[in-house]
Image (cartoon, helix red, strand yellow):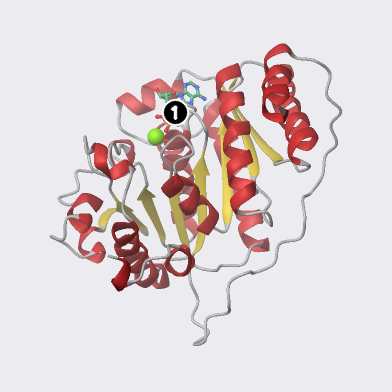
Amino acid sequence: MKWEQALQLLRFGQKIPTERTTGPALHCKVEPDPLGVVRATSICVVSGKGGTGKSLVSASLANLLARRARTLVVDADFGVGNAHILQDASPQYTVVDVVEGRRDLREVVHTCGEQLDLLAGGSGYARMAGLTPYELHLIAGGLEKLELSYRYVLVDSAAGVSSQTVALAAASDVTLLVTTPDVTAMTDAYAFLKVFLQRKPVSDPLLVVNRATSAEEAEATAKRILGVSQKFLGRQPRWVATLPEDRAAFRCTQRRSPVVVAEPDSELGLALQELAAAVDEEVGRSCARGIGRTLLQRVGYSPKSG
Ligand SMILES: Nc1ncnc2c1ncn2[C@@H]1O[C@H](COP(=O)(O)OP(=O)(O)O)[C@@H](O)[C@H]1O
Ligand SMILES: [Mg+2]
């Protein structure tokens, strides 16, 4: 019943009390690495609904982060990946080659630029949306080694609340939830939060409102999600950025280039740079637990279980 009420409020715009919070303090739940090795901080870009701008945001964030330190982008839309298009890359291998036993994850790494590498998703592989524990374990094991060589691992998620999407988000250090003002996108953002917070109660997800046509629209969108989350989940994400609706998105996608590279001074380009600064600040506050290492601990695969 709570779920129904939450959806009603998202749809019909009733007044919802909101308060800005900074979320609970984060604690490293994972045992410290016995060897004290330094791993990349992972940032997972998620949304409930497809088409909210996750890949657009990830492409620009990746480029900006790579200017500071080595960055690995993981296209976690494993079956219908397009992160490589936005980096104008043509990788020879994809994560499908790992799952199907032809390649090691390290061999799939494709260099996109100075300090910027990519693990590409496959194109048109429906079964990649529902990996077995063993297949996820293969990817996690590869990431656990790779993450030692990077400062940032940026995960461009698939849409939805599938267990593998939520598992990747829960294993990440920073979660960036992207929504648009569209009521279906807001509803699905709330749905994602609900599932995500059940899985990872001690977390502080960040909210990005994309494709806003005015500051008022952005604020109304954020307030709605914050309010409904607070009311029904007892928690709310932290609203950190607004990205404007901007035709630069279309032009840059057609040119296969991140907005911050092709049109850095556009309204969208400038907003993405602000977002990157907010993410970097968050990274500074987060525990770098290692997405591969955390996934390995949680995937629940043992060779006996098949
Ligand atoms: N701020 C924006 N202004 C205009 N169009 C945008 C904006 N953000 C994303 N888009 C467009 O929305 C579509 C979906 O974006 P994409 O990043 O592929 O979404 P997702 O990865 O969440 O499925 C693309 O055509 C993209 O160019
Ligand atoms: Mg995408």
- Place of residue 304 in the rendered image (x, y in percent of width and height, measured from the top left): 30, 72
Query: Residue at horizontal 57%, vertical 59%?
Result: 173
Q: Quadrant of residue 181?
A: top right
Q: Quadrant of the C terminus?
A: bottom left
Q: Is residue 63 visible?
A: no
Query: Is 25 situated above or below 197?
Result: below
- Place of residue 288 in the rendered image (x, y in percent of width and height, measured from the top left): 56, 67
Ligand 2 image-quadrant field = top left
In the figure, is residue 231 to the left or right of 183?
A: right
Q: Quadrant of residue 7?
A: top right
Q: Is residue 255 visible?
A: yes
Query: Residue at horizontal 77%, vertical 50%?
Result: 23
- Place of residue 201 in the rendered image (x, y in percent of width and height, measured from the top left): 67, 54
| Amino acid carrying mark 1 in the image | Gly
Query: Residue at horizontal 47%, vertical 60%?
Result: 152
In the figure, is residue 125 to the left or right of 174?
A: left
Q: Residue furthest top?
A: 12
- From the viewer's side, name the closer residue of 91 and 112: 91
What residue would you read off at disc 1?
50
Beta carbon of the mark 1 residue lies under 8 A of ligand 1 = yes
- Place of residue 42 in the rendered image (x, y in percent of width and height, measured from the top left): 50, 58
